[in-house]
Image (cartoon, rainbow, N blue to C red):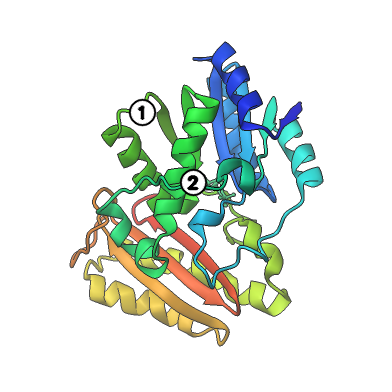
Amino acid sequence: MKVINSVAEMQQFAREHRGEIALVPTMGYLHEGHASLMVEARKRARIVVASIFVNPTQFGVNEDLDSYPRDLERDTRVASEAGVDIIFAPTAAEMYPSGYQTYVNVEELTTHLCGASRPGHFRGVTTVVSKLFNIVMPRVAIFGKKDFQQLAVIKRMAKDLNMDVEIVGMPIVREHDGLALSSRNVRLDTTQRRSALSLSRSLRVAKEALRGGEQSVAALKKAVAEVIEAEPMAEIDYLEFRDPDTLLELEQADERTLLALAVRIGSVRLIDNCILGEE
Ligand code: AMP
């Protein structure tokens, strides 16, 4: 496995291997969720490139850019075991040199959920992903459904801008106790981690309630909120039942409905989601 830091070198390689590359964009501090994307990439292309870049433009001024966990040495090991051929790990100055002033914005889908709580976040995401597509020239790019809205926004962007990249979404990988894997989980202490289990538990409660015949979003919201609010450390940022395609609000839920959550546990903001009818 090779580590490339320079845009020019990555692009030169990509030019020589156009049509053969699968890309897995990440912010590093890799875990089994990332590894599952890399394993899928391995099945879909001859060459797997994983990017590791904590993208400053997708963090708000008071967010956790500085405290975001980083460990390139460990990441190299995880990526290599998952079958990655090349790690592309540029610096912020390499990606955004002085004079930089171009951004990509998906207008509507980004107004909801994480876009509402984190203004400018998705503009940073779509910008960096566009840049990565131009640098790595992948035939296919793999993303996790853990960031459900991000996947929807990227699919929209690729379609709207006629990007010649297939966008693939993969299921959420969880710990045995249900906690969705996240690089931010390392910042939870033991008590906070216990509180964090309320996210996945509340998704199960909603699924069971729907199975039991409850379709009113107001009633389902109340049931989900009760599970999370029972944890003294947990503070709900949003709790929404939405159409999975448009992300618009619903009054009645069914098997296709997306339940998306963002919850603060101390200083750590966690997200989770499910489609109510899926296992
Ligand atoms: P991140 O490094 O958090 O920006 O995530 C990089 C990619 O990994 C994104 O496409 C995420 O959706 C995906 N990802 C993160 N956590 C998980 C998980 N627990 N299961 C599946 N995919 C994940």
Q: Residue at x 38, y 23 (%)?
A: 164
Q: Residue at x 24, y 70 (%)?
A: 217
Q: Secondary structure at mark 2?
A: loop
In x, y percent, where is residue 241? 30, 64
> Quick check: can you spot residue 255?
no
Q: Residues within 10 Å of mark 1 (few under 14, many from 20)?
A: some
Say above or below: 180 vs 116. above
Name of the residue lying farthest toward the front: 99
Position of residue 131 in the picture relative to residue 1 (left or right): left
Name of the residue lying farthest toward the bottom: 232
Name of the residue lying farthest toward the left: 251
Q: Residue at x 60, y 46 (%)?
A: 33
- Residue 184: image quadrant is bottom right
Q: Residues within 10 Å of mark 2 (few under 14, many from 20)?
A: few
Which comes before the other along the chain, label 2 or label 1?
A: 2
Say above or below: 224 vs 58. below
Q: Which disc, if any, is residue 27?
A: none
Viewer-side label of 2, 1:
2
Q: Which residue is at the front of the view, 32 or 140?
A: 140
Q: How many marks?
A: 2
Identify the amino acid type marked 2.
Tyr
In x, y percent, where is residue 123? 40, 52
In x, y percent, where is residue 269? 54, 70
Q: Which disc, if any, is residue 163?
A: 1
Q: Residue at x 53, y 21 (%)?
A: 44
Identify the residue under disc 2: 100
In x, y percent, where is residue 62? 54, 73
